[in-house]
Image (spheres, rainbow, N blue to C red):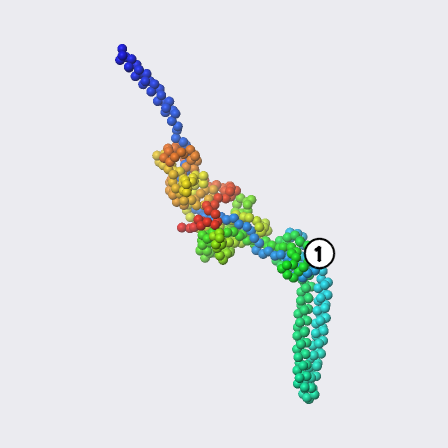
């Protein structure tokens, strides 16, 4: 009887274990699903990105070169003016009166010169017959030279007064866009010095400069490339989605700022339509090294592990491995991988947040890495591998 009871108890235990086993297997979570793809391999070109400001090639504060009464304004605020175009007129009558006085002084000096010449000729005749002394002759000769000097001074005074009359017409010293007038007709203005009243300002519009700061590494790179010609540059405004304007780097300052470690650079940008204005901000990119073969992955596929950048790769057995990589710039929304990946690595491009730790098994399904449209990339916030003042810009190997 005791044996029968033991057999029955064993059967019950076995049945219970048998019934629990499927339930335990059902509670085991399945391997997470992820999307993988091999890196996109294509020809790319590095660009160094900067933020800068537009500056006019020429800027002039228009001042009168003589003081006087403003009698007329001959432009509309904001007009485009040509060099030599009349902007303001001052009352010319005081200058004309001064010119007439100078001409009268010239006539007086000419009369004195004629008299001195006549007296010298007479003294020379009398000297031959010893009717006058040598001292008297020398005095007449000195009077002639004084009269000649007075003629030269009077002529110079006439030219100066003629300039004063000319300067009552204030003309544009350069071609460009004029600002608003700072004085109205009826005002008295000072002139003839840097402290004179500013009547308006003019800035040139085409071409226009784009000025920005670059690191010492950028300076070295573009100095070495200068032997091959000016470096091309592309610029976009803060509300533009594409780099639609192009120019050339044409100037670098003569010293690196020891406080910040950067140097001022300048590019010339065509601006025939006058759309670009001095003082506007822009985003520029300079062509770095030449075209080269690169591997690209989505920027979202790159994680940070302390000081390292890593990507998650699925092995042939379905396990996940983290690979440290060196990254480059963004190209069409994809990040350049300089080292750390092989062309046949299966990179996790979606579902990586489900990975709890390296070595975990996953269910991988194949995907494809495609470049983002240039317009979508440019409309997103610009991501730089490093600020312009650092020394980690892309340098050709």
**66 or 78: nearer the viewer:** 66
Furthest residue in direction bottom, as rendered: 129
Residue at the top extreme, as displayed: 1
In the figure, residue 136 lies in which quadrant? bottom right
Give the residue at mark 1: 187
Q: Position of residue 56 (x, y in %)?
A: 57, 54
Q: Is residue 10 visible?
A: yes
Q: Nearer the viewer, residue 339 or 118?
A: 118
Q: Is residue 306 left or right of residue 51?
A: left
* Image mark count: 1
Q: Is residue 281 above or below residue 351?
A: below
In the rendered view, tell whether residue 8 sits above or below residue 25: above
The x and y percentages for residue 187 are 71, 56
Task: Find residue 151 and report its horizontal and vertical position in percent.
Answer: 68, 73
- Dot 1 falls on a residue whose secondary structure is loop
Q: Quadrant of residue 365?
A: top left
Q: Position of residue 98 (x, y in %)?
A: 71, 66
Which residue ends up furthest to the front in the rendered image?
A: 259
Q: Residue at x 62, y 55 (%)?
A: 202
In this rendering, would 146 be left or right of 292? right
């Amino acid at each position: 009887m005791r044996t029968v009871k033991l057999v029955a108890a064993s059967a019950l235990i076995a049945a219970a274990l048998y019934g629990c086993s499927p339930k335990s297997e059902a509670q085991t979570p399945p391997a997470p699903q992820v999307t993988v793809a091999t890196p996109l391999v294509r020809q790319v070109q590095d660009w160094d990105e900067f933020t800068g400001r537009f500056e006019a090639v020429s800027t002039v504060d228009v001042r009168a070169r003589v003081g006087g009464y403003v009698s007329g304004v001959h432009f509309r605020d904001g007009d485009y003016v040509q060099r030599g175009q009349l902007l303001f007129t001052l009352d010319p009558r005081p200058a004309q009166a001064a010119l007439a006085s100078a001409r009268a002084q010239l006539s007086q000096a000419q009369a004195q010169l004629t008299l001195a010449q006549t007296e010298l000729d007479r003294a020379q005749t009398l000297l031959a017959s010893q009717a006058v002394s040598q001292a008297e002759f020398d005095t007449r000769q000195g009077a002639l030279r004084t009269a000649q000097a007075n003629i030269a001074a009077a002529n110079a005074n006439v030219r100066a007064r003629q300039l004063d009359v000319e300067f009552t017409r204030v003309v544009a010293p350069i071609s460009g866009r004029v600002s608003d007038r700072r004085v109205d007709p009826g005002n008295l203005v000072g002139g003839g010095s840097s402290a004179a009243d500013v009547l308006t300002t003019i800035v040139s519009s085409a071409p226009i400069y784009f000025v920005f700061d670059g690191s010492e590494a950028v300076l070295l790179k573009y100095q070495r490339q200068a032997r091959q010609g000016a470096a091309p540059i592309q610029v976009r405004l803060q509300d533009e989605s594409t780099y639609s304007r192009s120019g050339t780097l044409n100037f670098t300052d003569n010293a690196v700022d020891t406080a910040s470690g950067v140097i001022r650079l300048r590019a010339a940008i065509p601006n025939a339509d006058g759309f670009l204005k001095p003082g506007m901000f822009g985003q520029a990119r300079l062509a770095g090294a030449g075209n080269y073969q690169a591997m690209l992955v989505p920027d979202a596929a790159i994680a940070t592990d302390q000081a390292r950048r890593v990507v998650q790769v699925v092995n042939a057995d379905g396990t996940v491995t983290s690979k440290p990589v060196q990254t480059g710039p963004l190209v069409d929304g994809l990040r350049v991988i300089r080292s750390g990946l092989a062309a046949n690595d299966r990179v996790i491009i979606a579902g990586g947040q489900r990975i709890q730790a390296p070595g975990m098994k996953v269910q991988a399904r194949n995907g494809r890495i495609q470049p983002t449209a240039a317009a979508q990339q440019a409309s997103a916030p610009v991501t730089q591998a490093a600020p312009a003042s650092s020394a980690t810009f892309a340098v050709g190997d």
